[in-house]
Amino acid sequence: MSAQTQAQGGPAPLVIVGTGLAGYTVAREWRKLDSETPLVLLSRDDGRFYSKPALSNALAQKKEPDQLATFDAAAMATQLRARIATHCDVRRLLPDAHSIVLDSGEVLRYRALVLATGADARRVPIEGDGADDVLSVNDLADYVRFRETLRTCRSVAILGAGLIGCEFANDLVAAGHAVTLVDPADAPLSRLLPSEAAAVFGRALAAAGIDLRAGVSVNSIARCPRGYRLLLSDGTRLDADVVLSAIGLAPRIALARDAGLEVADGIVTDAWCRTSAPDIYALGDCAAIDGRVRPYVLPIMHAARALAQGLAGKLTRVEFPAMPVIVKTPAIPAVVVTPAAQGRWSTTVGMGDAPHAARALCEDPETGRITGFALLDAATAEKASLLKAMAPA
């Protein structure tokens, strides 16, 4: 049954575009407050509910891809008392008509519309006949394909030593794969960690067996009889059975942009998740809430709870407290709270018999107040006390 047919014969529904963490969470939170208004969710894929962060450590947990999904679309529809249209794309938004046009050509009116469309894996132009074969993992379907490829592969080259690249590298090397991690920055997690802590993190990855190639980029990827040959910017060559790109995400803004909504790095919203069009909201990886894209789990949860209140009639500003980012790398666990503004970093390395332990604190140069931190290895035990120190008086 189509989404349009489902919605006919009654009041216009709340429509949520996207069934990732953001879409499903705002639906759940809103259903706690409104049990009567019709609800329609539109999914580009099969609508299964799963934890996207779990994709980068499923090997270590010995989980097959199908085990990562906890509920299918039918179960989610029952839980949410909703109608979920799967394998359904939105072709156009018609803000003035409070309607959307589906890829089937059907038109669906909405009471309010929530855009939780997520983001696409970024790609950089690379020369060579193997460049188009580079894999990325941005959803469960991608991960299924990646795991199938791994069954006949031993060596993996990962492009990008950010959060996801490092987590995949640790997961793969722990499962017995030969892993090379390539990044133009001088150290891994360069956007999350201050330089001294990033260097410690890199040494720990190397000690775990990961071949870290920092400070270089990939110029070309050529197909070989088995696998690929990568030419790096320092002139060296690297052979790998499979190449995985993990260089970040690009918010999906085309649908909103084409409808005349304000966009920048993401779909622009205010602090109440309201876009520039009446009754259209956005959150999650696609949204720049109050001027900033916040792609991690905790910001999405905070935004979903506030938006649900607003959709139920109680306008609620999204408040983002200090939200730690957990880096799932057993070789060197890390917890990071990124400061909202520039500050003065100080880093202490080594704690007793833990050479990879590090504590980096960011302080406001005027007040001395801690505004962010990065904790590695044994130092992660200090997370709770530092969060308490950062809490408003």
Image (spheres, rainbow, N blue to C red):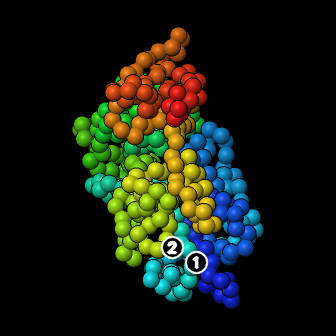
- Please, what is the three-letter code of the amino acid marked with disc 2? Asp
Q: In this picture, is 212 found above or below 224? A: above
Residue 389 vs residue 131: left or right?
Answer: right
Q: Residue at x 47, y 15 (%)?
A: 350
Secondary structure, mark 2, is loop
Q: Residues within 10 Å of mark 2 (few under 14, many from 20)?
A: some
Q: Is residue 356 in view?
A: yes
Q: In this picture, is 101 found above or below 346? A: below
Identify the image quadrant of residue 307: bottom right
- Please, what is the three-letter code of the amino acid marked with disc 1? Arg
Mark earlier in primary sequence (1, 2): 1
Identify the image quadrant of residue 10: bottom right
Q: Which residue is mark 1?
A: 111
Residue 55 in the image: x percent, y percent? 57, 48
Residue 152 in the image: x percent, y percent? 54, 48
Q: Are marks 1 and 2 in contact (CB under 8 Å)?
A: yes
Q: Residue at x 26, y 47 (%)?
A: 219
Quadrant including the N terminus: bottom right
Q: Residue furthest top?
A: 352
Residue 100 in the image: x percent, y percent? 50, 80
Residue 256 vs residue 68: left or right?
Answer: left
- Is 352 or 132 nearer to us in this picture? 352
- Is 284 or 391 nearer to us in this picture? 391
Rendered image: mark on residue 279: 2
Q: Residue furthest bottom?
A: 9
Q: In this picture, is 133 found above or below 375? A: below
Residue 121 in the image: x percent, y percent? 43, 56
